[in-house]
Amino acid sequence: MTDSHGRGTDAPLADLLRTDPRVVTAGADLLGQALRDQAVPVTEVDWRPPLLGEDGEDRLGEDRAGRTYRALRTVLGDARRTVANARALERMCAAGSELVAIRPASEVLGLEKGQFLHAGPPLEWERASGPMRGALIGATVFEGIADTPEEAERLLASGSLEFEPCHHRDAVGPMAGVVSPSMWMFELRDPVHGNTSYCSLNEGLGKVLRYGAYGPEVQTRLRWMADVLGPVLSRAVAAHGSVDVAAIVAQMVQMGDEGHNRNRSATLMWLRDLLPDLVSLGVDGTDLADVVRFVGANDHFALNLVMPTCKLAMLAAADIEGSSMVTVMARNGTDFGIQTAGTGREWFTGPANRPEGLFLGDFGPDDANPDIGDSAITETAGIGGFVMAAAPAIVRLVGGDVDFALAATRRMYEITLGEHPRIQVPILEFRGAPAGIDVTQVVRTGILPQINTGMAGAVAGTGQVGAGLVTPPERCFTAALDALASRATPGAEVGAVRA
Amino acid sequence: MTDSHGRGTDAPLADLLRTDPRVVTAGADLLGQALRDQAVPVTEVDWRPPLLGEDGEDRLGEDRAGRTYRALRTVLGDARRTVANARALERMCAAGSELVAIRPASEVLGLEKGQFLHAGPPLEWERASGPMRGALIGATVFEGIADTPEEAERLLASGSLEFEPCHHRDAVGPMAGVVSPSMWMFELRDPVHGNTSYCSLNEGLGKVLRYGAYGPEVQTRLRWMADVLGPVLSRAVAAHGSVDVAAIVAQMVQMGDEGHNRNRSATLMWLRDLLPDLVSLGVDGTDLADVVRFVGANDHFALNLVMPTCKLAMLAAADIEGSSMVTVMARNGTDFGIQTAGTGREWFTGPANRPEGLFLGDFGPDDANPDIGDSAITETAGIGGFVMAAAPAIVRLVGGDVDFALAATRRMYEITLGEHPRIQVPILEFRGAPAGIDVTQVVRTGILPQINTGMAGAVAGTGQVGAGLVTPPERCFTAALDALASRATPGAEVGAVRA
């Protein structure tokens, strides 16, 4: 047989040598790199095997793998899933966020002396990392329960003080996220769904409580924040009326902020909005100058407004039976925990990874604590690491390069249910932010949520050592999948895994 | 003869049919479009013929073309050119900018009653466009020289009032750029080179003087700006000491502002910097609230700080014999004018183009005045349209899409002498802004500087009708080239046009 050019049928093979090769690769890049070295165009397909779990077994162990595949099939076949996920996404994206008051935690959360909140899933003192211990020690001294850090540590270790996750009170806290009764809290309300969320006031950078520092400068700052900053801002909010923080979040993503490690424009917009009322309070000029200087000099001040805004979005999507959407991602410095819309307040945890990134001063990778903080609520809500493409300047802080930032955002569309109608990424032609992490898509694709984060020193009292990039441990998602499977309502017979 | 595969030498031609075609096109896109319709990959080369002048002759007319080629050869062969351009670029990029005072134009510029400044190159009343007439009418009424717009117009037409370009006093003015003695001016100093520049305070958007409106609301606002805004801000600057505006300009480009039509983050950063001193002045609470509300609510407020900062950069590069770098681009609504480092204060003008873009409300292209304003000093200094890639959200205001914004910035590297070391474009991996427009590169490539701009209504009194994209007329550059050629110092014999 010959083709139309009169060549034998072996011609297609021979063409391999006559024409320029074009190669598609997947998985390990050994072949791709060798080809690129020879100037051959290579298209990489970013494929990886599904997450099969890693519960102490071989990653590809038949039992665990079989179980994950069965769970995936069951959840994907859940008759309620499509409608439930659409409803979760719709509610998440429709949520509003208004700052309605600033009040002490004792008043607004009913927190009593000796009670503390902390970031992430539940934790015992024995398993707490350095920065978490440092922050709890600092808060115990701040509340006057102990006179020295040593005494505070003894009390905390003795079990005579109580601490529970911020999320259990619909609050969120960056890094260690420790809240004590005397701290003033932002109180935000979702006017659409009626939920309320809370976050403390941001202390700034360097040696601060949330990074595990607890020395005199930390105590002095916390005291001033409780005596001056909180009360003054509280009066300004009362005079102003509610501040639309959801609008600020949408706008900040147009201004190079991703809302997790860049909150520069959001801080300035919030201050701008409050300013006419703030300057009309008749507050002592020195205090007023100190307040505007403190807020204006802290590019992260609005993080503590963005986080509870994200929490409100996720609260709107909580408790929707049949939905496989992630509603919480949070770390306590030891464990990473997630919650999903379809499994209520149950935590699915795994050991927190250590971020990779850029370090301050003389610090290096050995100084960094594992991932810590409720601030991954930003990624849960579709901003932070999910909109790095909108904030390319972030790579100067957390590492990576601009290509990585663009790729990270694009990759997140693979594991999310939709695009946020109000939060748009200009550089991607105003495409909506990747919104609503779907446990089944994470497990099927093996793509983990991209988080960018601050890094706390591993030793209590150190403070911040850097900022970097991190992902959750896989097992949060395989465990959540198991739980979703156990609650699934079978739908039509499902012959094979389908989307 | 046969090749190593035993094929005849006609094989390469035959391969055209066997392998997928890949095509490179230049110029008119008819062929490219036809190929793309057939799914053939096409690489377009953005080539266009050099600017050959358009002085009423055929664009390719032998005389003008010959003259331009001769001028280009002469200027490129100028022995001083390489060093002069390097020096101009170095001085431009090294310039600092500090806001040192806010004072009335009468005091700071010695402007007397009946004297006005305006945007762009020199202009007579008879040739002035609607918005320029409107602004001059408004300023005449504001100064109490006339009681009615009609009386003002008669006086202006009679020649009894004086007006000259802002640039002649080292000032710059957005849009009509009209300055009168009672208006308060930002006074900025370059601490590196010792130059000083000036700009009025920004009025906000809508019916404002600089867009040619002059009605009662314009008069009321100008009065408040002179009575309250100027004096209060002036005291704050005096208390604060100089404000580093050059640093703000570098930072704003990291925050989605391009400095011409987006000045949102710059406005907030400037207000933030001044705030502690502003709130400590003991100013009446209502006035203080009005001031922070007015500044905070006007995303363009910092344009009037960015423009004189760019003017300082270009003043540092002025008067360098042998340099073909553009130091001024400015429009008066009728003419577009440029100046170059090698030709002193001489203007090279051509008819201003009409911007294309997006319109407010019911306005359309027929309502727009030709290009107007000194604000193209931003592009002259390497920001504005030159860093659209850093401000993709700008396309929602001026038209185009994100690809256009990226392409515009990349294209500007073709006509600029270097990259700005301090002003960086994050999305282009922090590449420095395209800095220092070179007349010879503009003429050789036919690529005109990309300007984005506000659009004034063509009828006096209308105000803003939209915002859009525009380029200078070619003849500014061919005329400047002629002047540079006439001043050239021959170098080594130049056989052909070279860079």
Image (cartoon, coloured by chain):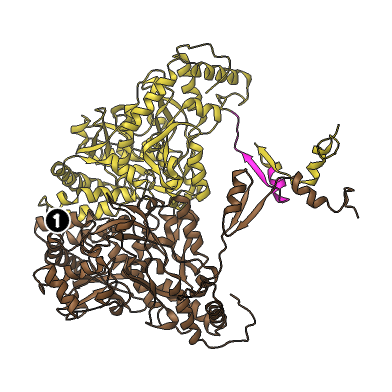
Chain colours: A brown, B yellow
Task: Left or right? Give the position of B46 relative to A303.
Answer: right
| Quadrant of the image containing the N terminus of chain A | bottom right
Q: Residue at x 27, y 36 (%)?
A: B97
Mark 1 lies on a secondary structure that is helix
Q: Quadrant of residue B235?
A: top left
* Type of amino acid at the residue the image marks with label 1: Asp
Q: Picture coordinates of residue A102 (x, y %)? A: 21, 70
> In which chain is the residue bearing label 1?
A
Q: Picture coordinates of residue B11 (x, y %)? A: 83, 38
Q: Residue at x 50, y 16 (%)?
A: B77
Query: Vertically, is B117 above or below A296?
Result: above
Q: Picture coordinates of residue B196 (x, y %)? A: 25, 30
Looking at the image, how many numbered discs can be counted on the residues? 1
Q: Is residue A182 visible?
A: no
Q: Is residue A493 magenta?
A: no
Q: Is residue B43 magenta?
A: yes
Q: Is residue A493 visible?
A: yes
Q: Picture coordinates of residue A212 (x, y %)? A: 23, 64
Q: Residues within 10 Å of mark 1 (few under 14, many from 20)?
A: some
Task: Left or right? Give the position of A250 relative to A487.
Answer: left
Q: Nearer the viewer, residue A457 or A340?
A: A457
Task: Left or right? Give the position of A232 relative to B373.
Answer: left
Residue with the mark numbered 1:
A290
In the image, the segment drawn in magenta is B32-49
Q: Residue at x 60, y 26 (%)?
A: B59
Q: Quadrant of residue A202?
A: bottom left
| Quadrant of the image containing the C terminus of chain A | bottom right
Q: Nearer the viewer, residue B374 or B422?
A: B422
